[in-house]
Structures are given as structure tokens and as C-alpha cells.
Amino acid sequence: MRTPRPFELDRATGQIIRPGSPIGLVRNLIVFASQYTVGVITAINAGDRALASIAGRAISGATAGYFIGSTIALLIAYRRKSAADV
């Protein structure tokens, strides 16, 4: 399991503080562009509708899995760090 980027934990509020990165923005733009492209192909070209629909579901599922996995990794790291700080 991939560990999240390093972060600081504010023990008073329980907030996670970590620096931003352009990688997340680029990743989200690529996902949006892929979904948009699949939607346009589905709307315009009836012959490729089935393939585009399958590709759209694959992109959506992979994206959801990535975000759920990164959330779980962040929660595990958060609990470890908060337990270590006590």
C-alpha cells in the first residue's frame, strides 16, 4: 500500500496540514478530460458507444479505487501519527 505524502498533525484541532502539489491538479484534469472525451465519443459516434461506455466505466472505477485507497492510506497514517504523538 502506498503511503501518503508527509504531513503535520495539529494535535489541538486534529487537522492534517500538508503542502499542496501540482500533481493532484494535473491528475484530476486528466481524469476529467478522459471522462469528457468518453462522453463526447458516446454522444457523437453511435458505433463506438459500447466501447466508450466500457472505457468510461473503467476510468470511473479506477479513479474511485485510487481515491478510496489514498483515503484509507491517509487514515492509517493519521491514526499511527496521532497514536505516536500521545
Image (cartoon, helix red, strand yellow):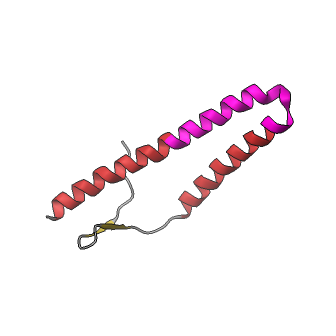
Magenta-highlighted residues: 42-64
- Vertically, is 55 above or below 82? above
Q: Residue at x 73, y 39 (%)?
A: 38
Q: Position of residue 36 (x, y in %)?
A: 73, 46
Rendering quarter of residue 60: top right
Q: Nearer the viewer, residue 25 or 12?
A: 12
Query: Residue 56 vs residue 5: left or right?
Result: right
- Vertically, is 85 above or below 75? below
Q: Is residue 3 visible?
A: no
Q: Residue at x 28, y 57 (%)?
A: 78
Q: Position of residue 59 (x, y in %)?
A: 61, 38
Q: Is residue 67 visible?
A: yes
Q: Nearer the viewer, residue 69 or 26?
A: 69
> In what quadrant of the picture does the N terminus appear?
top left
Rendering quarter of residue 62: top right
Q: Residue at x 17, y 64 (%)?
A: 85
Q: Position of residue 9 (x, y in %)?
A: 29, 67
> In what quadrant of the picture does the C terminus appear?
bottom left
Residue 79 shown in magenta:
no
Residue 61 shown in magenta:
yes
The dominant secondary structure in magenta is helix
Query: Residue 77 vs residue 21: left or right?
Result: left
Query: Residue 22 vs residue 1: left or right?
Result: right
Q: Residue at x 42, y 48 (%)?
A: 70
Q: Position of residue 71 (x, y in %)?
A: 40, 50
